[in-house]
Amino acid sequence: MCTGRIDPQFVLKAFQSGADGVLILGCHPGDCHYKEGNYKALRRFHLLKRMLKQFGVDEGRFRLDWVSASEGEKFVEVIRDMVATVKKLGPLMTDKEKLRVG
Amino acid sequence: MGKPKVAFYWCASCGGCEEAVVDLAEDILKVVEAVEFVFWPVAMDFKVKDVESLGDGEIAVSFINGAIRTGEQEHMAKLLRKKSGLVVAFGACAHIGGTPGLANFVNRKKIFDWVYFNAPSNDNPGKIIPQEKTKVEVGELTLPEFYDTVYTLDQVIDVDYYLPGCAPPPDLIMKAVEAILSGNLPEKGSVLAPDKALCDTCKRKTTKPERASIKEIRRVHEVMLDPERCFLDQGIICLGPATRDGCGERCINANMPCRGCFGSTSRIEDQGAKFLSALASIIDMNEEEEIKRIIDSIVDPAGIFYFYSLPASMLRRRLDI
Ligand code: SF4
Ligand code: SF4
Ligand code: SF4
Ligand code: FES
């Protein structure tokens, strides 16, 4: 799926469902199959990151990066780094009782 | 057969929804004619025990406005639910949390610290804060629990219908009352307003940006507002794209942008995120540092995107406190 198709609601849904981090990976700028999708994603990402901070979601839990299909090594590196960051941050507190969700 | 019994109650509310009923003007006489009010604390002298003494389901319909912020409000909502055939969440606060719901960016402790200790107008040397139980000579006094989190009405009880708006406009109220009296009701759970976006009926929609075209985001006091042009096209945040139609563009007609009091259409789950997405799409900038600069110029994104809908949003509140 092109990163330009990623609705911010998907990201919130992931956090709401208990994800401790969300990582979006897309084609490098200039390489998007739909030309501008990743630029749109970049704008949404920065705005969403800023907004999530106001919800008490640490910046480290939400990341956007560019990895092309041929960059196996970078892919591994980004994932490792994300996992390490999220592990350090620990679980995101979603107090189901306080929030009265099922 | 007697007239249908009706209750009108307020929870965490500003009173504006009560005022909206008075704003029905002469239409209110039609309503009074057709129904019997059994509970309406703001206007008539009833007691809780009057409600308690009714049979289950005996009230035809309870209109409840305001969000749920205290234990007493939850208790009253539950009592009215038990005694009523239908419950209508009346107004933005009951429907989606409303402006009281913005308190979900903080918690009880922060609110109490500010209100009872730190607000500049305070003089509280004894550091007194309200207690749920206080012993006095004559016995024990109680106050309701003040919750950490503000809830929408449907997060504490089952709700049959929603009348959106801060406050709901008279035409929608009358339509809802007529529908209830005639039994001509839509599917349970419906919002009693059109299911399309505000922009669809907005007079300014011809100038609404279709693609990336704005380079700055401004606040209403920073510019001379063009009374004809779409607010978004002027770089002004207007929640129209993520907001349900039906208010008659009250704010737009007063040359003010929409803040989303009608909540979203049924296809949108999170009003704030939906608006965020729409806004990011029309920012005309691909250079990362510039994007950040433009985004940082929005003073309080979460507060504005969820001006009315924070408790109804996917995350519901600030998570780390
Ligand atoms: S919806 Fe608006 S008018 Fe009604 S109680 Fe809430 S703030 Fe007041
Ligand atoms: S964004 Fe606001 S001003 Fe523009 S068309 Fe929609 S409701 Fe009207
Ligand atoms: S323009 Fe928006 S904020 Fe104003 S009354 Fe209509 S829905 Fe509510
Ligand atoms: S196709 Fe658009 S980001 Fe990869």
Image (cartoon, rainbow, N blue to C red):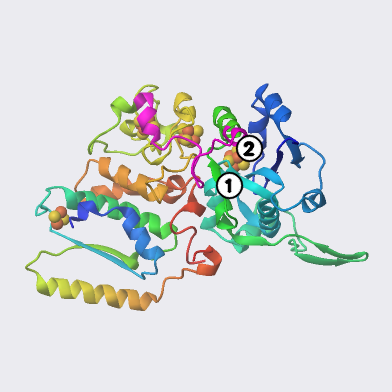
Q: Magenta region: which residues?
A: B179-204
Left or right: A65 in relation to B101: left
Q: Quadrant of residue B209?
A: top left
Q: Is mark 1 within 8 Å of ligand 1?
A: yes
Q: Nearer the viewer, residue A3 or B152?
A: B152
Left or right: A12 in relation to A98: left
In terms of secondary structure, what is the magenta stretch mainly? loop
Residue B17, labelled with which disc? 2
Position of A91 relative to B298 (above/below)? below
Q: Is mark 2 within 8 Å of ligand 1?
A: yes
Q: Nearer the viewer, residue B210 or B235?
A: B210
| Residue visible at 29% across and 26% down in the picture | B207
Q: Please indicate, yes or no, whether residue B276 appears anywhere in the rendered image.
A: yes
Which residue, given by chain and number where applicable, does mark 1 sit on? B94
Chain identifier of the residue bearing label 1 in the image: B
Residue B212 on image: x %, y %:
23, 39
